[in-house]
Amino acid sequence: MSLASELKDCTRLISHFGRRGAWRNALWVLRDMAPRLLPNVIVYSASIDACGRGEQWALAMALLGEMRGRVGLRPNATTYTNAAGACGRGLEWERSLALWEEFLEEGGEPTLSLCSALVGALTRSRRWEEALCTFGEARRRDLHPDAILHSATIRACGQAGRWQAALSILAIMPEAQGGLRGGGGGAQAAASPRLPP
């Protein structure tokens, strides 16, 4: 088996463990690769995602730091998306926002996935204004926000009782891929005022 094939197999295994929340197993695979195989950006991104899914944001950030310390390994949009998502799961919205800003400062081109990860992090931490700004930034950059990004932003506004903002996003949601057919029910529920029992 070639080293390239082995590297792909390790990446698949890390991703497999990550999807199941088995972050310890994913990190074991990462550490077991050395010294025979040198992890690349894809391997680190998958490992960061595995830590995030396992709600281990600090480990995800440590891996990002380790990756940066390696000569020639520069985080890409997927790496930043996974790191921002990991921080969001840990309610570390400031770190997610700092990753977004760092990515832009390094000249990165934002992706819809990165915007969605950031809005998700902000929504979990009930930071509706920042979520709304990120949504606006995605539109300004012509990233074509999808139903997922619309719904997360609506949820952020709805949690804060900002119904007008939530409804204004709901009003433009049919422009998104999938429109109201793809997830509007959840978005409408998120925008509906909660009535007392």
Image (cartoon, rainbow, N blue to C red):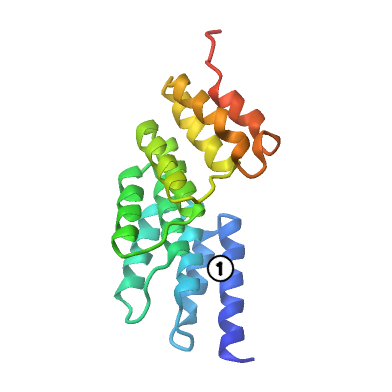
Count the marks: how many?
1
Please tell me which residue is depicted at 38% across the width and 63% down the height of the picture.
108
In the displayed image of the protein, which residue is found farthest to the bottom?
2
Please tell me which residue is depicted at 56% across the width and 68% down the height of the picture.
14
> Mark 1, residues whose alpha carbon is within 10 Å: few (<14), some, or many (≥20)?
many
Q: Does residue 89 appear in the picture of this structure?
A: no
In the displayed image of the protein, which residue is found farthest to the top?
197
Question: Which residue position is annotated with label 1?
Answer: 14
Q: Amino acid at mark 1?
A: Ile
Observer-nearest of 108 and 79: 108
Position above or below: 1 against 125: below
Please tell me which residue is depicted at 28% across the width and 60% down the height of the picture.
105
Q: Does residue 145 appear in the picture of this structure?
A: yes
Image-based side of 123 in relation to 70, left or right? right
Give the quarter of the image for residue 180.
Answer: top right
Give the quarter of the image for residue 128.
Answer: top left
Position above or below: 156 against 90: above
Observer-nearest of 88 and 191: 191
Give the quarter of the image for residue 9.
Answer: bottom right
Dividing the image into 4 quarters, which one contains the N terminus?
bottom right
Please tell me which residue is depicted at 38% across the width and 66% down the height of the picture.
63
Residue 88 image point, x, y percent: 42, 45
Dot 1 lies on which element?
helix
Residue 26 image point, x, y percent: 52, 66
Position above or below: 93 against 39: above
Residue 94 image point, x, y percent: 30, 45
Dividing the image into 4 quarters, which one contains the C terminus?
top right
Residue 48 image point, x, y percent: 45, 62
